[in-house]
Image (cartoon, rainbow, N blue to C red):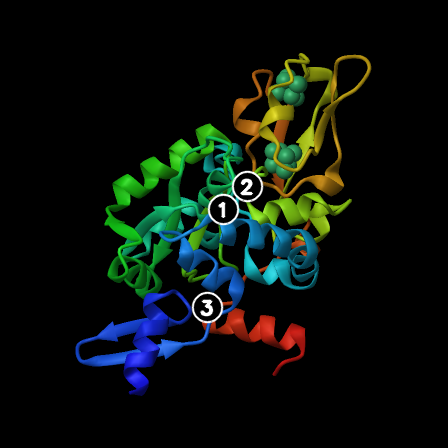
Amino acid sequence: DVFQKLDHMAERGLLFRIIKGDQRKYAAIPFVHGIFEFQVGDMSRDLAEKVQVYFDEVFHQAMRQNGDLLLRTIPVNRSIDADLRVASYDDAVEILKGLEKIVVTNCVCRVRAGRMEEDCGKPLEVCFLFGSMGQYYVDRGMGRQISLDEAVSILETCHEAGLVTQPASSQNPGGMCNCCGDCCGSLAAMNKHPKPATLVFSNYVAALDGDACSGCETCVARCQMDALTMNGNGVCELTVERCIGCGLCVTTCPSEALTLHPKPQELQRVPPETTRNQMMAMAQKRGVV
Ligand code: SF4
Ligand code: SF4
């Protein structure tokens, strides 16, 4: 019957499903984020290669059109001056604190890269799902529920490893990824653009004091957007148009030459309040509603 077919699709990651008591609700999902992520436990080499073609030929166009409504970049907490007030939706720990259910799963992008023997080797179990989305992952055996303390500890590991924290573009996100420029489809798509800062939804940007730079090159490797390069004099240079405001370079600069600042007020953005509003904004931008 219809329910059997819907359940079969949900078990294969082709539909989202919520089970509450004896009630079941189903929702259609996009390929990213949706069908692709739901294959995290069942990624074949064939699928990994097909997704690579999709990323190379199609996804970067979708990112240019709608990327800012899909994911946001939020900064490493320690990269921001303690005197500055940070909105709770721009603070990863505050986002985690407000949640009843936190589930962690493997990063599907690094799983996919691993199937193609191109894995960057960075931590794997780092992507968070919340609420009913988290429950779907638990129901399908794709993730495990964790405490707030463990989630904060995983976040710390991510920042030490140089991963960019990207929640869904909502004040009440269904998930929060920790991404690398090597494997992540979203960051790779942004990286192809000459000015990633114009694509990303981020309220922060780095600044560099070149006189303070000791030329250690640590930040060059930390930056996933190639925003930091060394000039002929052995001093770091920052291309602001490539900076997505993650703060990863700031926390490891031994000379305190790098700092992170809020963008000017006119460029500050508040994410949609709910996931539903986020999805509606994406659909409206694509002209389908
Ligand atoms: S990490 Fe700091 S000191 Fe080292 S190159 Fe970058 S800006 Fe200069
Ligand atoms: S320069 Fe690079 S590492 Fe530093 S905040 Fe910008 S994007 Fe992040």
Q: From mark 3 to mark 1, how far is it between C-alphas?
A: 22 Å
Question: Which of the marked residues, 3 or 1, is nearer the chain's N terminus?
Answer: 1
User: Closer to the camera, 51 or 212?
Assistant: 51
The circle on residue 129 is none
Q: Nearer the viewer, mark 3 or mark 1?
A: 1
- Residue 210 visible to an observer of this rendering: yes
Q: Is residue 208 left or right of residue 137?
A: right
Q: Are marks 1 and 2 in contact (CB under 8 Å)?
A: yes
User: Which mark is nearer the camera, 2 or 3?
Assistant: 2
Q: Kindly identify which numbered label has been placed on residue 109.
A: 1
Q: Nearer the viewer, residue 104 or 86?
A: 104
Per the rendering, the mark at residue 275 is 3
Tell me the residue at 70%/46% (across/down): 196
> Could you say which quadrant of the image residue 54 lies in?
bottom right
- Report the front residue among 98 and 153: 153
Q: Which element type, helix, strand or loop, lies under badge 1?
A: helix
Badge 2 residue CB within 8 Å of ligand 2 = no
| Helix, strand or loop for disc 2 | loop
Q: Amino acid at mark 1?
A: Cys
Q: Is residue 121 above or below residue 105?
A: above
Q: Residue at x 38, y 53 (%)?
A: 42
Disc 2: which residue = 183
Residue placed most toward the observer, 132 or 245: 132
Q: Residues within 10 Å of mark 1 (few under 14, many from 20)?
A: many
Q: CA distance from mark 1 to mark 2?
A: 6 Å
Query: For residue 138, what is the image quadrant?
Result: bottom left
Q: Amino acid at mark 3?
A: Thr
Looking at the rendered structure, the secondary structure element under dot 3 is: helix
Q: Position of residue 58 (x, y in %)?
A: 67, 59
Question: Where does residue 90 sit, x and y in percent of width and height?
Answer: 50, 50
266 w.r.t. 256: above or below: below
